[in-house]
Image (cartoon, grey):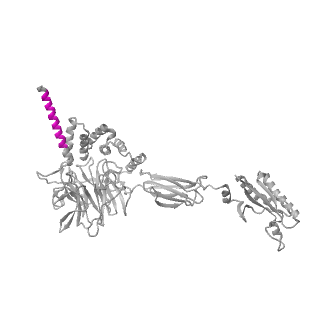
Amino acid sequence: MKKILYIYLLATISVFAQESQIKKADKYFSKASFEKSAQLYTTLISEGNSDSKILKKGADSYYFISDFKKASDLYKKIISKEKDSIEDHYIFRYAQSLKAIGKIEESNKWMKIYEKDIPEVIYKANLDKLESIKKQGNKFEIKNEAINTSKSDFGPSLYKNQLVYSSPKKNRGLFSKKYKWNDQAYLDLFVATINENSLDSLSNPFSKELNSKLHEANVTFTSDGKKIYFTRNNSNNGKREKDENKITQLSIYSADLIDGVWKNITSLPINGNDFSTMHPSLNKENNRLYFSSDRPGSLGSFDIFYVSIDSNGNFGKPINLGEEINTKNREQFPFISDEDKLFFSSDGHPGFGLLDVFMTKVTNETYSKPLNLGLPINTNSDDFSLIYDETTKSGFFASNRADGKGDDDIYSFSQTVPLDDFKYYVHGTVLDDATDYIITGASVFLFDEKGNKINETTITTNGEFLFVLKPGTYKLSAYYPDYIPAEKTFTILDNGIAETEQIIKIKKIPKTFLEELIAEQGDPRVITDNGVLMFDLPEILFDFDKSNIRIDAQVHLDKLIDKLNRYPLINIEIGSHTDERGTIEYNNKLSQERATSTMNYLVDKGIDSTRIIAKGFGETKPKVDCTDHKCSDDEHQINRRSEFVIIVKPE
């Protein structure tokens, strides 16, 4: 009995001990002390605790401190355990962890599952684009700078001939606090001198007024260097302020340089206690401040915003840069160049690793599709906080890549090839659907996916149209008189393949056989004479007192035969006429003989006799009236004629 009781007591003690350890680990996790929470969750898991909540928090702890090998091992267990019920963000972090440790193909497999709402053709295009960027080779020469330590060095910013950056405090007292996230010292601002695009190995604290017991990082300056914007933990008179979860968020502060001292340290009105506002970058006009934030209204975990600053220093309403730039994941570390090139880091756009650096061109309120800067700026690790000098085509950025000196290192770079995005265009032509002939003069209209017309052109003698486009879905519409307009929808994929060809075929508007007959240009044409439809043949003339078909008439009658063969739904009435010379009886007889002679010629050439009425009108319908004068021989010749009236057969 005592033995049983002893075993029970041991089990109870073990349960209480584990529950206590779970509470302790959860407390560290809730306060973002991920270095400590990772250790405790690992102990719990090694003791046999396979609860999903423990596995997830353990994996996230390692993910947040960039230990991606341990993170990927735990995410794999979670996905295997929960399978179809796993939340999307764990799949994303698993894919990112795999990419960070070099398992690219496996990462792509899981990223495809995460991006299940993206059509496969577009997902494949994203991978093809990355391969195209790889094939372009290195666009920069980079150098790991001597100022780097074994800790986290990042957030470079140019200030006169110096570089201001962030690094953990170097002179820490025995009781100095550590940043619980990674168990390192809090960040201060440091400064190093730049000599010929290279940094001195020595650096010093930037400002004792700005550096505090909390984090200071990521700065930007006005053009005259007299005002600074920088990131700091939310605080009031040096005391941190926490949100309802007891987390101290980040905010942007400003300060003024007065007599060589930074004064008037002020929290910007765009800040808040319940979200972070950080990574400021000021444009050269000093009237627009870009920053990243997870404030309400963000599309992802962090988005890039800007806020306008008027001449009196008043701030407008923060504006989200929108879906062209921001994704459902992270966009951070914006930097705006003098020529309005916006550089930023993202793990939401297709990239080579965790955070990749991208560039977009700002034109008014629009942004070009982000360009991945490629190798060697971007790797399978975090690459971020890039700044760029437009004049020297050089700059600095930070990365936690494997060959660095510490957690994050600052690298200098010089650009070796232009930073041009892929150029995409659609070209093609407009063809007659029946003949495949190019229709010169056809109009081609280009519409975006919302139906807005964005361009138009006309097919000229070169036979082609061409539009330069950015990736997206478009519609082409072709128009030409007497043809049915044709439309064609197509998608330009962001895959590095510039050329897309589109052939548009248009059909003639269907006509009745009579409309087609009238529209034909070849002889004999169809005309209307006093409301009567007839073939306009050159006069089928007869010699005086003759009814035989002359050689010159046969040429024209042969053309009529061709049309009668091609339009079987018409009959004709041949009306033969004489001049006024001779008796009425004789002329009636002669005109009938002439009409019959013309009919016989057509019948002999294969035209069915039932389609022809041969009628002689004698001298009753002259073209030249001779009652008021004596007709000349030429006028008599005009009256000796045959006419061909069109009779439409009932269908």
Position in image of residue 369 (x %, y %) = 38, 56
Of helix, strand and loop, which mostly describes the magenta segment?
helix
Q: Which residues are magenta?
A: 4-25
Please identify the residue farthest to the bottom as the structure is shown: 628
Quarter of the image holding residue 615? bottom right
The quadrant of the image that shows the N terminus is top left
For residue 124, side relative to residue 200 (left or right): right
State the image quarter where residue 510 is shown.
bottom right
- Tell me which residue sits at (29%, 39%) in the image: 78
Nearest the viewer among 230 and 396 is 230
Horizontal side, residue 570 vs residue 493: left or right: right
**How many dots with numbers?**
0
Viewed as shown, does residue 370 lie left or right of 544? left
Q: Is residue 634 left or right of residue 75?
A: right
Q: Position of residue 114 (x, y in %)?
A: 35, 45
Task: Return the x and y of residue 475 as percentages of the image width and height.
Answer: 48, 55
> Can see residue 27?
yes
Question: Residue 27, how many percent across, how many down?
Answer: 18, 45
Q: Quadrant of residue 389?
A: bottom left
Is 18 a magenta residue? yes
